[in-house]
Image (cartoon, helix red, strand yellow):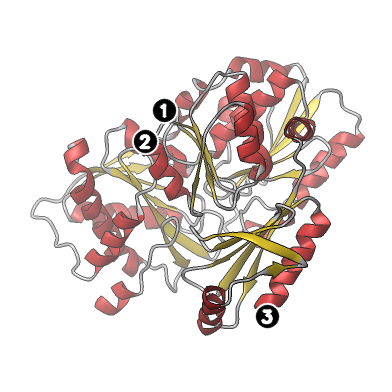
Amino acid sequence: MPVVANSIKFGTDGWRGVIGDEFTFERLALVAPAAAQVLYNTYFSAVGSRTIVVGYDRRFMAEDFARAVADNVTAVGFDVLLSETYAPTPAFSWAAKQLNALGALVITASHNPGTYLGLKVKGYFGGSVSPEVTKEIETLLLDGVPPANTPGKVENFNPWPSYTEALEKKVDIAKIRSAIASGKLTVFADVMHGAAAGGLEKLLGDRVNEINSNRDPLFGGGAPEPLPKYLSRLFEVIKTHRKADQLGLAVGLVFDGDCDRIAAVDGEGNFLSSQVLIPILIDHLTLRRGFSGEIVKTVSGSDLMPRVAALHNLSVFETPVGYKYIADRMLAAKVLLGGEESGGIGYGSHIPERDALLSALYVLEAIVDSGLDLGDYYRQLQEKTNFTSAYDRIDLPLASMEVRSRLLQQLQTQPLKEIAGLAVIDCQTIDGYKFRLADQSWLMIRFSGTEPVLRLYCEAPTIEQVHKTLAWAKHWAE
């Protein structure tokens, strides 16, 4: 048992691995009771409950693994509210808070390819637990949790009604529905075969055009990640709609596998990552909704975010990469919005959790209220801030963990003075190495903690310069 337990490690958002290899029923039988016990040790004094929510997405055998979690958690004395259907991860985070539970254990591998599954651990407050809590789970795995004299009980529940009701109250849902019904707005939703399926329809009615809504555990041979390379069908649908010379605005919304990350495609067929959506949301929520509070961004977030925040006199707080750091800040301060470059966006008026369906509603509300296509809205913000940039990121596989160590040592002992012909004027090290260059562009070099992968991020005035800088970084690493 100790050997197996030693090999189970939590990453930036939960524990995940290849089904049948790292992720097995045997290992889950160790992790689930340990997670339940640590939730109890950490949060019982705050919530006074022994109930844990268990949920799942649409991956291969996800409901079977969720049932195994429920069985193993009740065996050590906890009561379980087991979902009777798949749902977005934020729906289970919401359920944990709304139902006064210790927390939630969610079977999902988020945006990973179909061969993966995993477990996310959420606290009673409706967000991801801290790194300290997951470290305690890893420690407890070595000892195990003894079975209880009196096992807990399992009760089934449907997470959707309470969750969608909560979201409807946060936006002018009638105005969005009216715009869709009148043809002023056409909404396409690529749910990527994941847990967002049916979500917008529940909120906005059956005039939402959903694609990739069938359950496909192989995700069409790709991964349920909101990136352009996986969105060929959505691009084609938007292109066809545009050719039909339809009146009104159009937007494509993209949801990852467990519906906590979002991207979009504007009416002209341009991909818009959260680097674009977050500035739009900051502007909309302050200008038209009167929201206030701090903007929390990860170190890899676009420089446009603080510039738009400055337009509205909002302060900005920067964190390492990983939404759990944003969630920690949301629990400690008054936050308007917290977002990361990979698509996770959350709101201080909701729960400290990224929520793609709520983000989608706010994006739709921004389009309806402004009367602008998303691409035009973004260009207006660039003009207002006098800031234009392009952004890209690549993940570079390394030959081994030894190569990773060698590159890391090189960065520590031989700091880079020049990158792609530009002088380095500053280096930020709260997460990896973020080099600010003479023209105010930046390159960020960040290593995966669990595998030999180098993540390279760049923002510069033009996409050509972005690609030149990333090519330089790739050559440096190789």
Task: Kindly identify which residue carries mark 1.
Answer: 162
- Residue 392 screen position, x and y as percent: 71, 56
Task: Locate the C terminus by quadrant.
Answer: bottom right
Residue 157 visible somewhere in the drawing: no
Residue 153 falls in image quadrant: top left
- The Cα–Cα distance between marks 1 and 3, rounded to whole angstroms, is 51 Å
Q: Amino acid at mark 3?
A: Glu
- The Cα–Cα distance between marks 3 and 2, rounded to whole angstroms, is 47 Å
Disc on res. 478: 3
In this rendering, the label closer to the viewer, 3 or 2: 3
Q: Amino acid at mark 1?
A: Ser
- Residue 330 screen position, x and y as percent: 41, 38
Q: Residue at x 39, y 47 (%)?
A: 128
Vertically, is 243 above or below 177?
below
Q: Residue at x 33, y 34 (%)?
A: 97
Neighbor class of circle 2 (other Cα within 10 Å; few <14, some 14-19, many 20+) is many
Decide if residue 376 is on the left or right side of residue 412.
Answer: right
Q: Amino acid at mark 2?
A: Ala
- Residue 433 screen position, x and y as percent: 56, 63
Q: Earlier in the sequence, mark 2 or mark 1?
A: 2
Q: Residue at x 18, y 47 (%)?
A: 152
Disc 2, disc 1: CB below 8 Å? yes
- The Cα–Cα distance between marks 2 and 1, rounded to whole angstroms, is 8 Å
Mark 2: which secondary structure? helix
Task: Kindly identify which residue carries mark 2.
Answer: 95
